[in-house]
Structure formats: C-alpha cells, structure tokens
Amino acid sequence: MKLRTGERASLLLGIIVAGLNFFSCGRRPQSQPGAPISGSRAAKPTPINLATVGKISGTIYFKGQAPSLPIIHMGGDPVCASKHQGKPVYAEDGKVNPNGTLPNVFVFVKAGAGKYIFAPPSKPVVLAQKGCMYVPHVLGIQAGQQLKIISEDPTMHNVHLIAKNNPEWNVSQAPGAPPIVKTFSRPEVMMTAECNQHPWMRCYIGAVGNPFYAVTGTDGQYALKGVPPGAYTIEAWTATFGTQIRQVVVRPKQTTKADFTFKPS
C-alpha cells in the first residue's frame, strides 16, 4: 500500500513517540547527585519497632592532672561584667568535674544508622546568650531541625558560625531583638559559634543525621536512647582532649555500656 507524504510523516511521528514512551517506562527517573528527591518514598522516615530498641550509655572519665582554666576578663563590656557580680568566670574548654569525669563531651552515633531515615524534630534547639556566655557550651542538633538563638543580655551580640559542610553565617543581635533561627542541611561535627563583639564567647554545635546523640554534664554520663538493634560506631568528641570511637552492638531491649577515658593532651 502506497502512503501519501502526510500519512508517511504521521506514521513516522507515531513510531518515534511510541519508542520514547517505551524507554521512559522502562527507566526510573535519575536525580541529581546530592539533591533531595521531593515526595519520594526514600524521604519518608523509616519505621522502627519501638518494642525492640535498646540504649547505649556510659561515663566519660578523665585520668591525669586536670588543666588550669584561665579566667575570662569581661571588663571590656561593663554590661557583661555586671552580670557576674564580681565573681570570676572561667573558660569551659578543658573543664573536669570534681568526680573525675568530663562535662561538655558530645557523644553520638557516627556510623551504623545510615540505613534509617529520621524526621527532624519539630521542637527547636535553643542556644542562649546569657551573661555574655553561650548556654549550653556544647549542644547537639539533628540536621534539618531548627536552631533558635536568643539573647538575655542588654548588650549587642554577634553570632558568627564557622563551618565546613554547612554555609557560614554572621548575624548581629541587638538587645531585645527577635531570636535568630537557623537550620543545618548537612551533618557536621563540630561547628563553632563565636561572638565578634566578645572574643571569649564560644560554643560548639554538633549536627547529626540521627537522633542518637548526647552531651555530658556534671556527672560525666551520657545515654543514647531508642537505638534499633544492630552494630554501630560511636564517637566521643571533646574540645580539648581529642576524640575517641567505640564499636558497639545494640541488642533488643538491652543497654550497651561504652565508657571512655581521656588523658591530658
């Protein structure tokens, strides 16, 4: 059967469209490297059986002579000095608790939780500027969770975030100004926040991709709760004495103990 010119063109166009449909149906759409896949199943949180989760806990010990902490001199800003009523304020890096343990240690699951997807908490993490000091000195946050920075001081502050995997920013905060709200899209341990107005002000922020992190306090203890059974690598970070890692196995409904001991650097 002889086809006219118009019929031949229509037939050829139909063949091309059919071929494109065939190949598009047989392939999955490719995403850009590192780009989030909006609305995909991979973006949904991984279901976890809470009846089987366990816990990782321990104590961070210090062995050796505790370093002498320098006194912070705030005379350059009378407002800051007045907040402490003449009492000496000491630097927090290198601090050792009276019971021989370490505060301000950031402990987190470094590896092993990558197969899970965790939705960032809706409640923000609060970083306060109080008495011209950052409170807390070390904090953890989940990537995608809001960081809310507030000031309780009647003086100008300037929050300067220093990071490698996340964008660096530098924001001024006047007395009575609204909170500064930021998020970190990528995990990073650790980031540093400083104040350009008060050079002694410094704190550390650990952003992780899972909710399994903690910061030790005056008892030197930590607890990572709700951890699914499996093998993990945990890391203990300190600002002065370096970092240490442990390999642990979490079994259903059990607590895995993992202590760390640091020495003078």
Image (cartoon, rainbow, N blue to C red):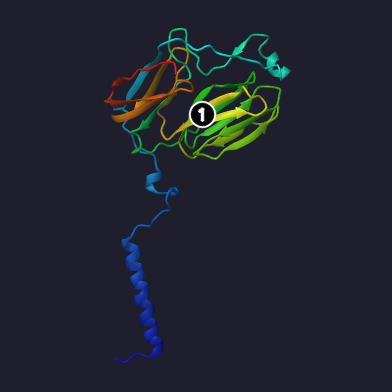
**Lateral position of residue 220 relative to residue 56, left or right:** right
The x, y position of residue 213, in whole percent, is 42, 26
The residue wearing badge 1 is 205
**Lateral position of residue 238 relative to residue 87, left or right:** left
Could you tell me which secondary element the residue under label 1 belongs to? strand
The x, y position of residue 66, in whole percent, is 47, 11
Which quarter of the image is occupied by the N terminus?
Answer: bottom left
| Residue at x 50% of width, y 12% of height | 67
Q: In the figure, residue 193 lies in which quadrant? A: top right
| Residue at x 31% of width, y 20% of height | 255
Q: Nearer the viewer, residue 26 or 200?
A: 200
**Image vertical order of residue 103 relative to residue 226, above or below:** above
Q: Nearer the viewer, residue 255 or 241?
A: 241
Residue placed furthest toward the left? 251
**Lateral position of residue 116 relative to residue 74, left or right:** left
Q: In the figure, residue 215 lies in which quadrant? A: top left
Residue 228 appears in the picture as rendered: no
Q: Nearer the viewer, residue 189 or 14?
A: 189
The x, y position of residue 111, in whole percent, is 35, 33
